[in-house]
Amino acid sequence: MKLTLLFVLWCLSFVVALPVRGQLVLSAIEKTVSSQIAVPNVSWQELKARLSSSDSANFLLFDTRPREEYNVSHLSRAIQVDPQLPTEQFLAQYGDSLKNRNVVFYCSVGYRSSLFLQRAQKALAEKGAQAALNLQGGIFRWYNEGNLVVDANGPTDKVHPYDRIWGSLVKARKKKE
């Protein structure tokens, strides 16, 4: 897995400010993560449809990025959890709210959230979660497809880039006149 991720990072070095190429690299990262970490994924399209449906309250969203990234923007209703939070502590905090819920984890591109879900998957099922899913492509894909992200003040057009290289995978939105 490390060799594959090193290859992806090498590919990222060629992404400097080329949006089309950046999206191709993000797609390659999505495929790499889903092939290397065996967890169920949900596409941004399916999640958007489900969150717009009458059973949207049945979805519980967890942002597995550090607080500083979450504070810049996150999906509406998402709860921030430390990506290194032990499963036992996660269950102590949120276990009672998992029963019969669809639990979705996300991060920037889906890597950290996949690892979190992989670690917690069995415990989530034991707590009665209806489904436990990773948002494929993370907040970068969600945002790049024109979907709403928020901060403490409401809708925002910013996403924490993680760093300069990874941030090249985030499409700049056109300024509203």
Image (spheres, helix red, strand yellow):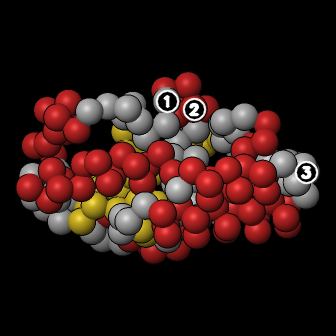
Picture coordinates of residue 38, whole percent (x, y): 38, 65
- Horizontal placement of 93 versus 38: left or right? left
Q: Residue at x 29, y 56 (%)?
A: 103
Mark 3 and mark 2: span between their CA atoms? 21 Å
Decide which of tag 3 and tag 2 comes sooner along the chain: 3
Picture coordinates of residue 123, whole percent (x, y): 15, 50
Q: Residue at x 49, y 69 (%)?
A: 35
Residue 69 is labelled as 2
> Does the CB distance between marks 1 and 2 fall below 8 Å?
yes
Q: Is residue 47 above or below residue 115?
A: below
Q: Pointer 2: residues within 10 angstroms few (<14), some, or many (20+)?
A: some
User: Can residue 112 be seen in the rendering of this structure?
Assistant: yes
- Horizontal placement of 46 versus 56: left or right? right
Query: For residue 31, which quarter of the picture?
Result: bottom right
Picture coordinates of residue 62, whole percent (x, y): 37, 45
Q: Pointer 3: residues within 10 angstroms few (<14), some, or many (20+)?
A: some
Q: Residue at x 49, y 30 (%)?
A: 66
User: Can residue 138 be seen in the rendering of this structure?
Assistant: no
